Image (cartoon, rainbow, N blue to C red):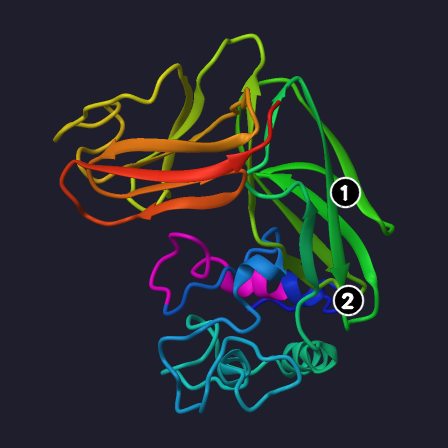
Amino acid sequence: MSRLPLLRSGHRSYLDANCSHCHRPGGPACQSEWDARIETPLGASLILGGSVVDTLGVPGPRIVVPKDLEHWVMYRRLSTATESYRMPPLAKNFVDSDAVNTLAAWIGVLTGLPEVSLASPATGRLYQSPAKIVLTARAQTTNGSIAKVEFYAGDQKLGEATESPYQLTWNVASAGSHELRALATDSLGVTGSSPTATISVLDATSGGGLLGDYFDEINLTGKKFTRLDPMVNFDWWNGSPAPEIGPDAFSVRWIGNITPKYTETYPFIATVDDGFRLYVSNRLIVDKWIDQAPTIHRGTIGLQAG
C-alpha cells in the first residue's frame, strides 16, 4: 500500500496509486463506476456523490460526500483492514491512518463541486468555416475561488482562462460538429464540468446541403461520422446509412441554414418512418419521436426575410 505525500493534490495521487488499477473505465471487478485516475477531472470522476453497489450498511451511501463521513463509503473501506471490504482489497494488512486522516480533512473542507456553464456558444449554433468562435463560461465555487476554466472540444483541450470573464477564441478551419464543455477548477483543486453544447461548422465552399451527424444508437449517441448531405431524401428501409452503422437502430441529426425570401409563415413537411423532430430557429415545430409507419408530418413557423 503506497504512502504518498498527501498535501493539496496528494489525495488524488493516493487514490490513483492505490485504487485506479480497478477503478477506471473498463477496470476489473469494479463495484462502482467511479474513476480514480488522477488525470480524470474530479467533476467527471464520480468520486463526489457517486453511487455504490455494496452499501456496507451505510445509510444513503455515496463514494464521497463533502463534509459528511457518515455516508462516505470510501472512508469506511479505507478505515479498515477487514478482508471483506478493505480498500485496497489486496495486500492490505494495516490501516494507513495518515492517509485516512488527510483524506478526511480534504473532504471536511469541501462543500461541493464548482458550478460552471457555457454562456456561449449556445447548443445547436451553426457556423460557416473558417469560423472564429468565442467560448465564454460562467463559474463559481464555495471552495475558495476559481483557479482556472478549461475549454474542451470533445477530448481536445482548446485552452484555458484564469480570470473572469472566462473566455477563449477558437479558430475552426474545417467543417464538422463539435461537443463543447468547460471545466472549472477551484483553489482546493476540485473540478466541476459544464453541460455539453453541440455546435456545427459548415464548409462554406462545399455548396448547399445539411450537415449530418450519424449515430449508431437511436437516441443520438454513439456518433460514427459527420458528412454533408446535399439533400435529405433517404430510404434505408431495413438497412443502414453506412457499413459501420447497424441496421434499423440508428439516428441522424441534420443541421443547416435556410434563407427566407419573404417575411411570412412557412410550412415544413416531411415523410418519416419512426422518430422525427424538427427545429427551426431553435423552436421545436414537429415532435414525433415515436415508432410509426411512414407518416407525413407538417409544422409551420413565421420567418423574417433574409
Q: In which quarter of the view is residue 191 placed?
A: bottom right
Q: Nearer the viewer, residue 156 or 81?
A: 156
Q: Nearer the viewer, residue 59 or 259?
A: 259
Residue 41 vs 215, above or below: the answer is below
Disc number lying in front (2 or 1): 1
Q: Assign a secondary structure to mark 1.
A: strand
Image: magenta residue range: 14-30
Left or right: 217 with respect to 5?
left
How crowded pointer 2 is (Cα within 10 Å; few <14, some 14-19, many 20+) is rated as: some
Q: Circle 1 sits on which residue?
A: 160
Residue at the image position 77 percent from the left and 73 percent from the top: 142
Residue at the image position 54 percent from the left and 23 percent from the top: 260
Q: In which quarter of the view is residue 159 placed?
A: top right
Residue at the image position 45 percent from the left and 61 percent from the top: 23
* Residue at far right of view: 163
- Asked whether disc 2 touches disc 1, contact meaning CB atoms under 8 Å apart, the reply is no
Instruction: Check disc 1 and give the amino acid type.
Output: Glu
Residue at the image position 72 percent from the left and 46 percent from the top: 150
Q: Circle 2 sits on which residue?
A: 188
Q: Position of residue 274 (x, y in %)?
A: 21, 42
Residue 95 vs 279, above or below: the answer is below
Q: Earlier in the sequence, mark 2 or mark 1?
A: 1
Residue 142 vs 222, above or below: the answer is below
